[in-house]
Amino acid sequence: MAETKPTASAVKASTSVQPKGGGSNIISWLAPIVCIIAGYIIWRFILGSASGFTKPDPEGGFWPSHAGPIGALHGIYEGGIIVPILIGMFLMVIVFSIERFLTISKASGKGSISEFVRKVQYHLANKNVDAALAECDKQQGSVGNVMKAGLRRYKELITDAELTTEQKVVAIQKEVEEATALELPMMQKNLVFLSTITSVGTLVALLGTVMGMIRSFGALGEEGGAGAAAALAVGIAEALYNTALGIATSAFALIMYNIFTTKIDGITYGIDESGFTLTQSFASQYK
């Protein structure tokens, strides 16, 4: 029986790239709780400060019944108990936007990705794999990490006499895919919070708006004269403040989500180009 050559998968059981040790993602569960608490503190003690109302509620408590706000800032307090939730969601957008900006900026690495790929292509065309690896160390981003993993396998397979060229190309491609699978989750992590707030922020605001309108029509049914007009004004203010905060929060979250996904798409394109560069270079130069 003729001896068969081992397949690429038999030679390379796992990727040389190790999973990133991010530890427990504490920000994912701690930040929402802290932001909601901070939203309540802002609403209760800053917007709802007794000194900002002509008729403060001396009893205080969880939700004081202040009346007659002095200025628009304290008027937001009349938006009701939904306002601290919306403020907390707005703070979440800020926190996760900063966290994603730092992470994606690190993943982007140094310099232009397209320029980095061109330099690697030049070195590979001259069969200088070590110089290409040095470029990966300089790039210090996700594209560089994936390219480096592929180049290490690339370098190993140059002197491999057992596998065919097709098997070597498959092995390089597999290495790139495995390295990519380790990089992408790190970039996409926590974006779900921004996408969720984009939708939920509007729904929460709608809930506050409905509660305000219920309060308004309830006042019309129970009181008459000037008292009804005052209660109606408070209810409408509650509805409009919730609507404004919800729209602003959702719009901000949507803008930041689109910015980050666009940046991730650019990095992903660079990773795809890197894999194509490695396989095509090897296939053409080591037939």
Image (cartoon, rainbow, N blue to C red):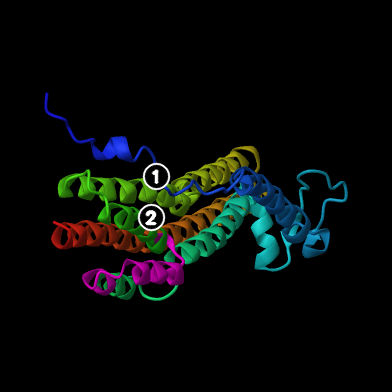
Query: Along the line of sight, which residue is nearer the eye, 60 or 20?
Result: 20
Name the residue tied to disc 2. 149
Residue 123 among those drawn in magenta: yes
SS class, disc 2: helix
Residue 117 shown left or right of residue 91 in the figure: left
Residue 69 figure quarter:
bottom right
Residue 42 shown left or right of residue 15 in the figure: right
Mark 1 residue crowding within 10 angstroms, few (<14) / some (14–19) / many (20+): some
The x and y percentages for residue 264 are 38, 59
First in residue order: circle 2 vs circle 1: 1
From this view, report whether residue 161 is shown above or below residue 2.
below
The x and y percentages for residue 201 are 50, 49
The x and y percentages for residue 23 are 61, 45
Name the residue tied to disc 1. 15
The x and y percentages for residue 135 are 39, 71
Residue 42 among those drawn in magenta: no
Residue 256 shown left or right of residue 160 in the figure: right
Query: Along the line of sight, which residue is nearer the eye, 93 or 49?
Result: 93
- In the picture, the quarter occupied by the N terminus is top left
Q: Amino acid at mark 2?
A: Ala
Q: Amino acid at mark 1?
A: Thr
Residue 279 shown left or right of residue 51 in the figure: left
Q: Which residues are magenta?
A: 122-142
Mark 2 and mark 1 residues within 8 Å of each other at the beta carbon: yes
Residue at 46% in and 66% down: 140
